[in-house]
Image (cartoon, rainbow, N blue to C red):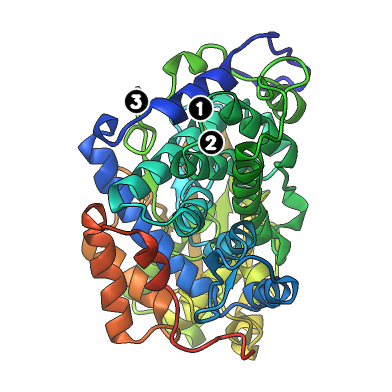
Amino acid sequence: MQNNPHAKVPEKMAVTAAAADFVETVQFEDIPEEAIRIGTRCVLDGLGLFVAGTDEHTVRILAEDAREQGGLEEALLPGCGDAKVPAAMAARVLGTSGHAHDWDDSQVSLDPDHVYGLLTHPTIPPLSASLVAAQKVGGVSGKAFLLGFLTGFEVECKISEWMFPGHYKGGMHSSGTVGTFGAFAAAAKIMGLTGERLRWGFGIAASLAAGIRVNFGTMTKPLHVGRASENGVTAAVLASKGFTADPDALDGPWGFFAAQGGGISEAKIKQGFGKTWTIVDPGVSIKPYPCGVLTHPSMDLMVKLVTENDIKPEQIEGITLYAASNILNPIRYPIAVNHLQAKFSLPAELAMIALNRKAGKVEFSDKFVGSEAMQVMQRKIKTRHDPEIEKLGFDKMRSKITIHLTGGQSVSGSADERYRGGPDHPLTDAELEGKARACCEGVLDHDEQERLIKTVWRIRDLDDARVLADVIQPKSDLTGT
């Protein structure tokens, strides 16, 4: 369905009622085993990312602000030892921490009208909300935790899929907007909301949902996900106290879909919630690199070219990347001067690989990005729009690279359209564990890393899910306060 910014939404689509009914009635036994398996992998990925984000300046500012505000000691404050703050405030810091490296997973869609990689990062909002809700409520089992998380994941992904792509193309950041509903649904499930309070909660969440793409490449981009997590928890808490909102706030001519998305696919909403679980079909992509997913096939290609041809940095005269507008437009920085800009800069990402043959937590640091070697190498890299790639459409992330070498030689290749980390080329469990360890490096020691990994693999057997909040806390206070 083509995007129409003036699309009218029928007055009674009943999506709000269907979402609330799903959240209230779904049980652990209703979840397919494959969804539980993939969901457990997403939890491991997400917890590692929470740890990775705790030593980011972005997150430390938020943690310091949370401590200064204080309040009820309901949930652990990430990176701050045993310090606790109100649940919603902890969710803000957690969500921002999980998205700080832009290393969190991506929703997959088979709809050719959706631009690949531009839906939502589905795990962090409901996982953040589940972590703080489990601490607030207490005594939540591992199965109940997974149920809450996967409920929020499903609600978030279905809403994201059903909305017209104009929501994202028009400048809204889905992970900040739609992520709010995922966080609310997860918190509401764990907190036991029912009936009209569930529908009020969706209404509150609809008015709180926000995030605009102009802030990509700044500290505010991960804050979108932090606010989605916080706002979802806030909506659940307020609704539980009887705070009212329109019971059909997603639907109708003034509802969320019409106001922010230009409409919703009437055909798609027939899928319903939890009939086919999005986490299984069409699936989720777990990122191998801490940057925008649209660049990953190009980065894999660059690794292949420099390693198979044993290309040294000093041999490179120049690099040209060819791609379509779906990649070149969102990846907006021609030269990155810090690690936040580097997440949206193809020259920066290819330069990292040209210099170090990898692009991970170390390379995505201000020190490395600002180094003379990086600044020089970036200026050797050019991006070019390719009309032939453009004609192939946006359902895949397609690109080509030519490396021009000293002596007049060149090496070229095309990116594998099977995105590594995606459903048809997933990271192995061992690779996922390796990513978790890389995320924890410098924050948790070896034994703490192993405890985190082992705890997640046995998550459904946990008597109290609060241990999941404990295993991501470093022994020392990273804020220094």
- 420 and 193: which is toward the camera: 193
N-term-proximal mark, 3 vs 2: 3
Foreground: disc 1 or disc 3: 3
Quadrant assignment for the N terminus: top right
N-term-proximal mark, 1 vs 3: 1
Quote the CA–CA distance across marks 3 and 2: 24 Å
Residue at 37% across, 33% down: 282
Q: Are marks 3 and 2 in contact (CB under 8 Å)?
A: no
In this view, 123 is above or below 281 = below
Decide: few, some or many residues near mark 1? Use Cα within 10 Å; few <14, some 14-19, many ≥20.
few
Determine the secondary structure under disc 2: loop
In this view, 312 is above or below 111 = below
Which residue in the protein does label 3 denote?
Answer: 276
Quote the CA–CA distance across marks 1 and 3: 19 Å
Instruction: Please state the horizontal and vertical placement of residue 79, each as a whole percent of the image.
Output: 53, 78
Decide: few, some or many residues near mark 2? Use Cα within 10 Å; few <14, some 14-19, many ≥20.
many
Disc 1 marks a residue whose amino acid type is: Pro
Decide: few, some or many residues near mark 3? Use Cα within 10 Å; few <14, some 14-19, many ≥20.
some
In this view, 85 is above or below 257 = below
Instruction: Residue 163: name its quadrant.
Output: top right
Instruction: Residue 307: name its quadrant.
Output: bottom left
Residue at 44% across, 35% down: 154
Disc 2 marks a residue whose amino acid type is: Phe
Instruction: Please state the horizontal and vertical placement of residue 320, each as a whole percent of the image.
Output: 57, 62
Residue 384 can be seen in this image: yes
- Residue 394 marker: 2
Residue at 72% across, 48% down: 211
Which residue in the protein does label 1 denote?
Answer: 112
Quote the CA–CA distance across marks 1 and 2: 7 Å
Disc 3 marks a residue whose amino acid type is: Thr
